[in-house]
Amino acid sequence: MAAHYLAPAEESLRAAGLDVQATILEPGEPTKTLAQAGRLYDAFLTAGLDRGSVVVAVGGGVVTDIAGFVAATYMRGIAWVAVPTTLLAQVDASVGGKTAVDHPQAKNLIGAFHQPASVLVDVDTLATLPAEEFRTGMAEVIKHGVIRDADLFEAVERQADAILARDGEVLETTVARNVAIKVAVVEADEREAGLRAILNYGHTVGHAVEAAALESPALPPAPAMTHGRAVALGMMAEAEIAARRGLVGHALVDRQRRLLERFGLPVRLAGPADMERLLTLMRHDKKSEAGRLKFILPESIGSVRIVSDVTDDEIRQAVAAISG
């Protein structure tokens, strides 16, 4: 994204009379490490940032996650502004104040709640977004429809062609509806003591699939696993659990499957999964409490429930149902 937006961002800030020091991060989940956070701390010190300084994170979810985390912990917290340039970051990662880096054994394990002073969204940035990155963001859009807004889900079904064509007006409306959903949930439960957990639909299984894919290139479907692909697979597995429990009918599972497929997202693993490894990864996830995994299961399109009594056998059966 630096090739497209670094110069305009610097020019805009300098035109406002601000001193600017830029640090470029490589895109992708491997950047979200303590080592890269250390690189940012060094850059902040070299630039002379103090408690009156502001960090401006221009980029995708990885950039906003790690920049927000470093801002939260540098000098015990300085202000930051998110300027998300990917669909995933615009509808999810930059909103809500969750900041983090990964640990080798778990995604987003090391983090802090640190709300940005502002989030500036311009859907025109999506015009330069690679197709795979756009699809990644659509997984979170569809997730929001399932958990909170049946009308949004139906609108995405109806306007799929326009969304794929990146129609500016449709994208602006779609992004705004997603931001409104997430803001409402976060305002009701900023630190995930209850309601906010619904935003993790698809993530209990999805984060484990994503982590396992980094360890074993044989696991993901082509192309390589992204966060959105992992969440799509997690949504399918968790909808399967709900269906097997009788919370929903298979019509909902099929409807979700069709919409994910419409946006080029995977609904089945390419091959059999290493279930014991996936279960281990899930237990290391921050959503595990006292050894019990927290799952978000749909009850209908637009409504979900939080459960903590899903058994290992239920997880195995659900993952088997979406395995090639």
Image (cartoon, rainbow, N blue to C red):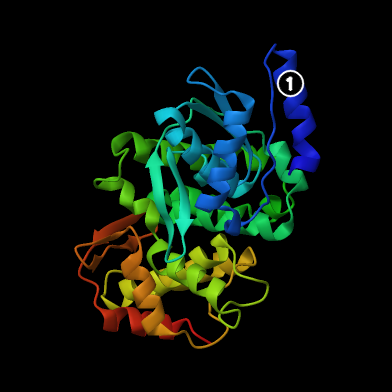
How far across and down, in percent of the image, does residue 267 sit? 53, 74
In this view of the protein, can residue 77 be seen by the observer? Answer: no
| Secondary structure under the numbered disc 1 in the rendered image | helix
94 or 252, which lies in front?
94
Instruction: Name the residue: 24% across, 45% down.
Output: 193
Q: Is residue 278 above or below residue 41?
A: below
Amino acid type of disc 1? Ser
How far across and down, in percent of the image, does residue 242 sit? 31, 71
Neighbours of disc 1 within 10 Å: few (<14), some (14-19), many (20+): few
Would you say 140 lies left or right of 184 here?
Answer: right
In this view of the protein, can residue 180 be seen by the observer? Answer: yes
Instruction: Name the residue: 77% across, 22% down.
Output: 11
**Residue 221 occupies quadrant:** bottom right
Question: Which residue corresponds to mark 1?
Answer: 12
Q: Is residue 25 above or below residue 117?
A: below
Instruction: Name the residue: 33% across, 55% down.
Output: 303
